[in-house]
Amino acid sequence: MESLSKRKAAMKAVESFFTTWALMKAGRMEPGNILTIVLFLFSLVFYLYVDQKLSLSPLKNNRNLYRVSAVIALIFSALYMAVDYPFYISTLTSPLFRFGIITFILCGFVLLFYHLLKWFYLLTGDKSRLNTLIFSDHYSQSFCRISVKCHFKMLSDFYLRHAGLSAFLLCIVCWLPYFLYQYPGVMTPDSLNQFEQVLHVIPYSNHHPWVHTLLIKLFYSIGLKLTGSMLVALSFYTVFQMALLAYSICYFINTLRLFHIRPGICFLITLFYALIPYHAVFSVTLWKDIPFAAAVLCFGCSLLRLIRNMTFKNVSSLCVFILSGFMLCLFRSNGWYAFLLCLPFLLVYFRKAGKIMFPAILGILITSVIIKYPVMNAFHVTQPDLVESLSIPVQQIAAVICNDRSLSDDELALIEKVVDLTYIKDLYDPYYADNIKELVRAGHQNYLAGHKREFLKLWIRLGLRYPADYLTAHIRQTYGYWYPDSFYHVAEAEGVSATSLGVSHTPLIRGPLVIKAKEIAIKMGGMLPLYGTLWSMGVAAWVLIFCVGCAFVRKEEQKLILYLPSLALLFTVLIATPVATEFRYVYFMVFSLPFYLMSALLILPGEV
């Protein structure tokens, strides 16, 4: 037995060595750095601790725990290194040494994340312990006692009775200074394009969702009729958007309370929305992505409520499900495709409650189809051009050309019938597709639209011939949405972009103190460890994947339906994004982050 224990410790020491090597390279440390000793000791102690905990846990025979941990650890490590590996081998020239270093470091990462995931799944898989931590009424009493000590008994009593309303009010109050400073709202060129459509300066277009443009027009028209001021009229929509975002948080908190989640946990979640500054900035930014994020959260919460109580009496949840489903389909183009991906799974999942759910699901589908095609055609709404949805393919073909790969005369001739290749190397940016898309628009896009099959064959043929170029191009075009160490300046848009439409940034509060406070709040995400992970798109994506794995470990596969809309949306971003790092494209995922985590821990009807 003692010999076995020594062998186990020796094995963990070897695993810790490889993990230390990986962390050393990831941290850009030299081998002689004394911190490598600290990393080795931490790794060794942690690995022994996890194995000991696992041996004493009732989950030690849960095969899903090991399988899910291994699969996610391998995928995460491979993707992490797909971006980071050039730094590990930058000083090496021997292919054998390069391959060896990459292999050893990959092993170190896989071992690290495998043990981390096992530990996390041990914590989340222990339902009896979680029941005590999350659902116990004792904490509610403690919450009240703490509030009494702080002389806020009336507030605590109000919060316990009206947690959702309290969340709504707290968010509005905390976002109000941003509204006053950014009055009438943050308007970028995309926002102004929609405002031009509202004013009929340019024709209607569905490049930015037409239904969202009409919503802006509705509140703008009401505000203009009541006040006669363009600025005040625009602020009517901004206030509506703030209220919509706050309502989705209120709905989420009320959903958690239906499952008897402790008020203290609900309060901490509310603070995530009320105090993280990018939520405040986005709440007053006139982008389609903001109400879309609210719709995704409401859609998930309504699904959770319907799973809990799937009867005709649950009218409010059905209404929220249908309304948020419409918004999902109509407020972003990728939302429509994500809904179509989810459709068969929703129909199968709710087949036993078909009398209730089928009319709702098919109603969303049919109504969206009617609006997207006959209605938009009747109003002469221009649809996005073909190349808008081809960001990834055009980038991959451009990468092959810019890498001077061999193309046949016929292949070159086909490409040159669409674009002029003279400036392609100057314009190609592996992280930004708009340059190449504009090159296509400046060429002969009609030829591309009329010969889709030939270009599809060309794309497939070049991909089979130069897979490494395609893979590299795709990684560079999408890494910001899954690589956890990518940094993006979030919520730095300010005021109203230059325009002759008659609106401008007109802050109602101003001064150096206000400006500096806003700057510090935004920049803190790029300065503080741990807190900074809340600003990472990649971290949000992996939290979502972790929660999917949690459903398998806890044998709660029915929860997968809760994550399916977000997974489908993430998938559509990864196959069509024009920009490698654009926070607002996946703001829905960051906004729903607490929903993923809490739904992973909830116990649904029929579960033990």
Image (spheres, rainbow, N blue to C red):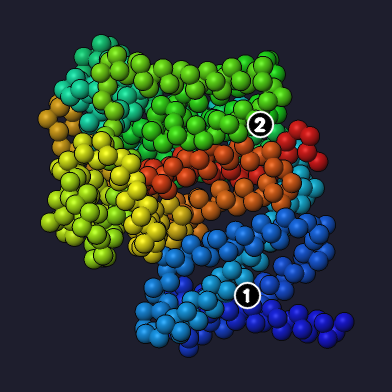
Q: Assign a secondary structure to mark 1.
A: helix
Assign the N terminus to one quadrant of the image: bottom right
Q: Are marks 2 and 1 in contact (CB under 8 Å)?
A: no
User: Pointer 2: what residue?
Assistant: 349
Residue name at image x 50 percent, y 40 percent: 568
Q: Who comes first in sequence, dot 2 or dot 1?
A: 1
Evaluate whether residue 475 shows in this view.
yes
What number is the disc on residue 43?
1
**Relative vertical location of residue 396 with respect to residue 564 in this rendering, above or below:** below
Estimate the x, y position of residue 342 in percent, counting from the top left: 54, 34
Q: Is residue 559 left or right of residue 245?
A: right
Residue name at image x 14 percent, y 33 percent: 499
Which residue is the extreme one toward the top? Answer: 225
Which residue is the extreme one toward the bottom? Answer: 32
Estimate the x, y position of residue 508 in percent, counting from the top left: 26, 32
Estimate the x, y position of residue 247 in percent, counting from the top left: 50, 27
| Residue 303 picture quarter | top right
Evaluate whether residue 40 shows in this view.
no
**Relative vertical location of residue 599 with respect to residue 475 in this rendering, above or below:** above
| Crowd class of label 1 (few under 14; some 14 to 19; many from 20; radius 10 Å) | many
**Relative vertical location of residue 429 with respect to residue 377 in this rendering, above or below:** below
Q: How many marks?
A: 2
Assign the C terminus to one quadrant of the image: top right
Which residue is the extreme one toward the right? Answer: 1
Residue name at image x 17 percent, y 46 percent: 417
Q: Nearer the viewer, mark 2 or mark 1?
A: 2
| Residue 524 picture quarter | bottom left
Residue in the foreground of this view, choosing between 114 and 361: 361
What number is the disc on residue 365?
none
* Amino acid at dot 1: Ser
* Amino acid at dot 2: Tyr
Q: Is residue 503 left or right of residue 127?
A: left
